[in-house]
Image: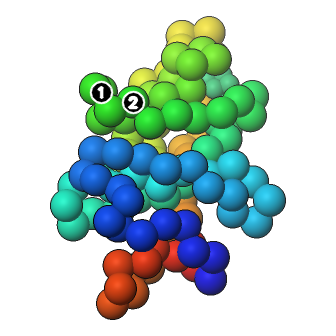
């Protein structure tokens, strides 16, 4: 297990980037109680994916694709291509001291 952060450093609505098995990854604290983590690489052309707090979605600015934060599914993608895969989820666990780990 790789420690990502501690919840005291991650407020609801905020995100933190981390590295997972050599890849860029992102952890979002979507609510007080809920976390979501993904490989932060767009399945289309492997550009970076960022957290858009205003839209409450994960965003790839390269072709403006949006992904649902709760399950990584595609919310919307550019009309210049027909299909884009979902983001790859990463399982996380929180211990009694509120440390968050990628498992
Ligand atoms: S690289 Fe992300 S939408 Fe094209």
Asked if disc 2 and disc 1 are in contact, CB closer than 8 Å, the reply is yes
Q: Left or right: 90 with respect to 11?
A: right
Measured as percent of width and height from the top left, residue 91 is found at 51, 71
Measured as percent of width and height from the top left, residue 68 is found at 37, 41
User: What is the residue that sits farthest to the left in this orientation?
Assistant: 32
Q: Which residue is mark 1?
A: 55
**Label drawn at residue 100:** none
Corner quadrant of residue 19: bottom right
| Nearest the eye: 71 or 81 | 71
Q: Find out if the beta carbon at label 1 lies less than 8 Å from the nearest ligand 1 atom.
A: no
Pointer 1 local density, CA inside 10 Å: few below 14, some 14–19, many at least 20: few
The residue positioned 64% from the left and 17% from the top of the image is 62
User: What is the residue that sits farthest to the bottom in this orientation?
Assistant: 96
Measured as percent of width and height from the top left, residue 37 is found at 48, 58
Pointer 2 local density, CA inside 10 Å: few below 14, some 14–19, many at least 20: some
Task: Give the alpha-carbon distance from disc 2 to disc 1, as whole Å.
Answer: 6 Å
Please tell me in which quarter of the rendered image ligand 1 is found.
top right
Residue 88 can be seen in this image: no
Q: Left or right: 17 with respect to 33?
A: right
Corner quadrant of residue 73: top left
Q: Which residue is mark 2?
A: 52
Vertical order, 23 against 52 (above or below): below
User: What is the residue that sits farthest to the top in this orientation?
Assistant: 80
Vertical order, 101 against 83 (above or below): below
Vertical order, 39 against 42 (above or below): below
| Nearest the eye: 21 or 67 | 21
Corner quadrant of residue 6: bottom left
In what quadrant of the picture does the N terminus appear? bottom right
Q: Which element type, helix, strand or loop, lies under badge 2? A: strand
Q: Which element type, helix, strand or loop, lies under badge 1? A: loop
In what quadrant of the picture does the C terminus appear? bottom right
């Amino acid at each position: 297990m790789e420690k990502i952060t501690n919840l005291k450093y991650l407020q609801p609505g905020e995100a933190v980037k981390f590295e997972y098995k050599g890849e860029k990854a992102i952890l979002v604290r979507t609510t007080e109680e809920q976390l979501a983590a993904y490989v932060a690489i767009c399945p289309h052309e492997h550009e970076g994916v960022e957290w858009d707090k205003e839209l409450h979605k994960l965003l790839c600015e390269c072709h403006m694709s949006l992904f649902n934060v709760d399950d990584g599914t595609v919310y919307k993608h550019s009309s210049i291509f027909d299909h884009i895969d979902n983001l790859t989820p990463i399982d996380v666990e929180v211990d009694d001291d509120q440390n968050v780990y990628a498992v």
